[in-house]
Amino acid sequence: MIKLFSNPLAIDQSTQKATALNLLSIKRPHMRGFLFAWLSFFIAFFGWFSIAPLITTIRKDLKLTNDDVNNSNIISVSSTILFRITAGLLCDRLGPRRVMFTILVLGSIPVGLSGLAHDATSLMIVRFFVGILGSAFVPCQFWTMQMFDKNAVGTANAFAGGWGNMGAGITTMVMPLLFDGVATNLEDHVAWRVTMVIPAAIIFFIAILNLLITDDCPQGKWEQHEKPVEVHEVDEKKSAVYNGNQSDADNRQVSPKPGLGAYLRAIKNPNVLVLIAMYACCFGVELAVDNAIATFFHDHFNLNQTTAGLIGSIFGTMNFFSRPTGGLFSDLLYSKFEIRGRLALQFVILFLEGLFLIVFNYSVNSGLGTAIVILVLFSYFTQAGCGTTYGIIPFVDPPIVGTVSGLVGAGGNVGGLVFATVFKIYAGPRTPYAFLVIGATVMSVSFLTFLLRVNGRMLVELKR
């Protein structure tokens, strides 16, 4: 049974990683690292998607076409692909804390300066550099992988990722409200520009806290992560003591720092390629929908900017429990059926995600209420799929887990780019059809689960 409120926190003595969570604690190093992993990710996503909820006002002010808006959405997602790939290797070499700090500081600058945009081109340039914030996901997941052992890592990853992803939903709700407050004293032309300074300041503040009051791993700073661990009590299942020469990679705190060859090693692994495609079909869908959903409800149901933002925020705020439950169920099935339990859940979640995306295409013709209900359902499975995917990643190639995490995370952005293009192709009255196309794609990719071989096991193994 996965414990979410373990007190005192259960620690595996051979790895110094936590085997449970205590969601009510912020004690160093494990739960403090968990807190800042998701909080930093949350505020990064808040900043990354802060322009989208105000796009109705910005579109009018900058005289943008629908193509301009869709192109800026695509650019904001595409730039993060490079940043995520780079962040993965940097985490392996420098640790999560400094990588997260750097991402937040660099990302806060274009967010704060986004008010300088005066036409479509300048808006696209701004959104390109704001995209660096999307790479905060990589140190977030890497951080929890350092703090939590294999039986709890799926849950930890999913809670941190889900609560962090929720920033995209909260910004859809909050930014229009902040704009309304600022606009009471300023013209819209100025108000949206001033509003953008608020998330920039918060991002910078959280970045400083990362550097000052957190740890990279149970041993403290990243430079200590390979330091031998003195073991006084050894689990019966882990009779070997880690003294710096432990051969069992599963018990080692972390492997030697990988170089650029880690990318080639990861890309040659078929499991990594399949997981990239799968993450493209859950997180990639989430990115595309986060950018499009408020505008869709505004245009399709003739709602005002604030109301459309509040309804659209349902999609992102579902992350509070949807992605965490994906990771939690993944860990529970792992405890009963080992890796095949994680794989079975992966297939079911992705298949149902695709199914409800297809249903959403038809639900919008039945009224706003029906559309919201189906939105909730496909939102749950989309985000739970992110949790189940990262429940598998720590088992694929542990010595280069940061690089694998970064590549799979970048795959999510590739998916976001592809699906944002689908929304561009089916813009305007045909937007519901985009959900049908995306849903059919996700359902097809779900069957790739049967190609995964992790820890020597497959979901379905044919007897010879």
Image (tube, rainbow, N blue to C red):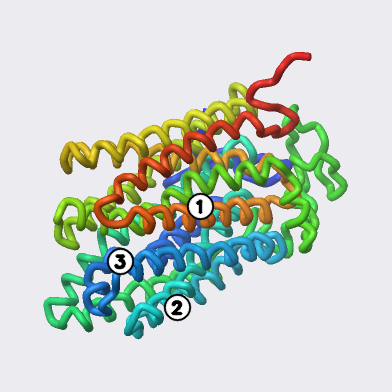
Q: Amino acid at mark 2?
A: Ile
In this view, the residue farthest toward the left is 184
How dense is the environment of label 3, judged by Cα within 10 Å: few (below 14), some, or many (20 and up)? few
Which mark lies nearer to you, 3 or 2? Answer: 3
Q: Amino acid at mark 3?
A: Asn
How dense is the environment of label 2, judged by Cα within 10 Å: few (below 14), some, or many (20 and up)? some
Q: Which residue is mark 2?
A: 125
Left or right: 6 in relation to 230 = left
Residue 38 location (% of width, % of height) = 47, 55
In the picture, the disc for residue 415 is 1
In this view, the residue farthest toward the right is 245
Residue 373 location (% of width, % of height) = 24, 37
Badge 3 or badge 2: first in the primary sequence = 3
At x 26%, y 74%, the residue is 58
Residue 53 location (% of width, % of height) = 28, 64
Q: Which residue is mark 3?
A: 66
Cα separation, mark 2 vs mark 1, equals 21 Å
Q: Is residue 22 above or below residue 88?
A: above
Cα separation, mark 3 vs mark 1, equals 21 Å
In the picture, the disc for residue 216 is none
Q: Is residue 235 above or below residue 108?
A: above
- Describe the element under mark 3 as helix, strand or loop: helix
Looking at the figure, which quarter contains the C terminus? Answer: top right
Q: Amino acid at mark 1?
A: Gly
Residue 414 location (% of width, % of height) = 54, 56
How dense is the environment of label 1, judged by Cα within 10 Å: few (below 14), some, or many (20 and up)? many
